[in-house]
Amino acid sequence: MKLVVVTAGLTQPSSTRLLADRLAEAVTRRLADRPAAGPAGQPAAEPRVIELRELAVDVANAFVTGFPNSRLRAALEAVTEADGIIAVTPIFSGSFSGLFKSFFDVVDNTALAGKPVLIAATGGTARHSLALEHALRPLFAYLRAVVVPTAVYAAAEDWGGGGDSFTDGLGERIDRAAGELADLLLHRAPSAGTEQEEVVVPFEKQLAALRPPHQAQAVKA
């Protein structure tokens, strides 16, 4: 099972990357616990991490040239062929980072259709947590992805802290979101090898099919 992690953290070390790794680990663990995850002895999921900071120039070049280079193309193919995606971004000015949005702008707009996606974000304060709902979730809804119900936001005070009487802690939110993504991955119809080859009908035949029979005969004569 192909699990792709897209992380848009800009620094090293990065709290965004840390959150992405914890989510990937939780999803992998959840999948490994399910008997239906895969053949015995085989890993249920092999997370592949795409660090967008390493592709920043490639993404910018793709915008001005209209073509992705080989490195960016490999990342786009990984996203397209993934069974599920974990997408994590830092929150800047109340929304996702420009690099995060730019990457998904160069992803084919049909590549994520029906694909399970777990969205997550990091920020300096919990006041920006709703960016997940007004920015990330609409973005992936537009791309026709299936976004898991639980979105995970980690503010600075969440690391190493528990929840309160009204909310779960970060660990509980990660575990719940991971379980939801694992459920979607296990119940999703496999995509590899099931797509039927598209049949292209020549335009002349389409026009001929629309003409009355006597006109079609006249054209042939």
Image (cartoon, rainbow, N blue to C red):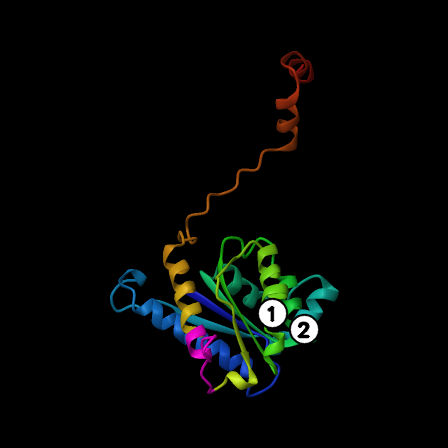
Residue that label 1 marks: 130
Q: Residue at x 45, y 75 (%)?
A: 168
Q: Tag 1, which secondary structure?
A: loop
The spot of residue 172 in percent (x, y) is 42, 75
- Looking at the picture, does residue 161 appear above or below residue 132? below
Which mark's residue is nearer the viewer, 1 or 2?
1
Image height of 33 relative to 187, above or below: below
Say which of 134 and 109 sits in front: 134
Is-magenta flag for residue 196?
Answer: no
Is 143 placed above or below 104 here?
A: above
> Magenta span covers which residues?
160-173
Q: Secondary structure at mark 2?
A: loop
Badges 1 and 2: C-beta atoms under 8 Å apart? Answer: no
Residue drawn 70% across and 75% down? Answer: 93
Q: Which residue is at 53% across, 53% downward?
A: 113
Whether residue 198 sits left or right of residue 182 in the image: it is right
Which residue type does callout 1 highlight?
Leu
Q: Earlier in the sequence, mark 1 or mark 2?
A: 2
Q: Where is mark 2, residue-wise?
A: 94
- In the picture, measured across the screen, residue 144 lies left or right of residue 163, that is right
61 or 2: nearer the viewer:
2
Q: Quarter of the image for the C terminus: give it.
A: top right
Give the camera-side residue of 148 and 13: 148
Farthest residue to the front: give it: 165
Kind of residue sitting beneath label 2: Gly
Visible in this render: residue 150? yes
Is residue 164 covered in magenta? yes
Asked whether residue 1 appears in the rendered view, the answer is no
Foreground pick, 65 / 59: 59
